[in-house]
Amino acid sequence: MKKKINAGDIFSIAISNGKFIAGRILLNVHKQCINSDLLDDDSVFVFYGSSILIEIFKGLYDQPVTQKQEVLIKGFFVDTLGIEDDLWKITGYQYPTPDELDFPENLIRTPNKIYFSKGEIKIPTSLDRTDFEKINTYPSIISSYAVADIGLHYLGLDKLIDPKFIKSADLTKMDLRFNESQRESIFEILDEDKNLSYHAMATKHGYDISRFY
């Protein structure tokens, strides 16, 4: 039986030393966006239709987590295999509010233009193909099997990661939020405020994230 995956579900993942990495599901893209027929045909979210948006909490926990904790990594997209295969356990629940949401930042290349992408936001840039290939940060759906390692990496605990998986725990090539120098230059090109929340930035560009909730 296919498992129900809901925004607000708090998950805990056991790691090898008996402790837990934890986080929360923020958005089930297929259920909340695609099935609800709330997207334009060219929406960036169509690419993420098989994924969920999650956040990772800032901690290594002795017990499964039942309540929201301080956030280490804001929203990024992963597949659902970790839940389907019981790698993740749903251990709590707290429904997200629109102002808690954040999304990966990357670039999209079309035949005629390079776009900055963040959630539903898609802004044309003056970048060319050479710039795009140099920056090399593009939309990705991350394996849910890598989530625990990603959490450990950004907690500074690479010693707990199998060495052959450390490289895949680094989000620098998947998300401008983890490459501050490149992010700074992109936001200057866009003439956008890099410190705006996603909710505020999306509203500015005509997108209402709250309609999915």
Image (cartoon, rainbow, N blue to C red):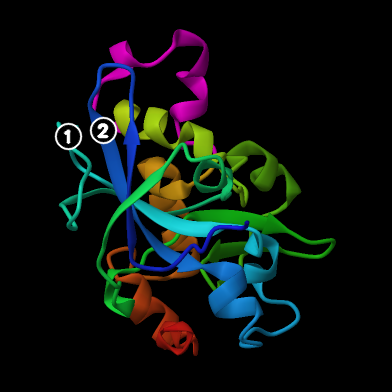
Expressed as whole percent of the image width and height from the top left, the position of residue 172 reads 46, 36
Residue 167 colored magenta? yes
Please tell me whether residue 192 is drawn above or below residue 152 in the rendered image: below
Q: Relative to the observer, which residue lies in front, 19 or 111?
A: 19
Q: Is residue 87 above or below residue 30?
A: above
The residue stretch that appears in magenta: 154-173
Q: In the rendered image, which residue does mark 1 sit on?
A: 61
What secondary structure is marked by label 2?
strand
Disc 1 secondary structure class: loop
Res 14 quadrant in image: top left
- Seen in the image, is 119 located left or right of residue 155? right
Residue 104 in sight from this viewpoint: yes
Q: Is 171 covered by the magenta stretch?
A: yes
The label on residue 20 is: 2
Q: Residues within 10 Å of mark 2 (few under 14, many from 20)?
A: some
Hey, which quadrant is residue 187 in on the image? bottom left
- Quadrant of the image containing the N terminus: bottom right
Total count of labels: 2
Q: Nearer the viewer, residue 128 or 95?
A: 95
Give residue 93's mark.
Answer: none
The amino acid type found where label 1 is placed reads Tyr
Asked if the residue under mark 2 is in contact with the one under mark 1, i.e. CB atoms within 8 Å, the reply is: yes
Which corner quadrant holds the C terminus? bottom left
User: Residue at 40% across / 28% down in the picture?
Assistant: 149
Q: Position of residue 56 (x, y in %)?
A: 31, 47
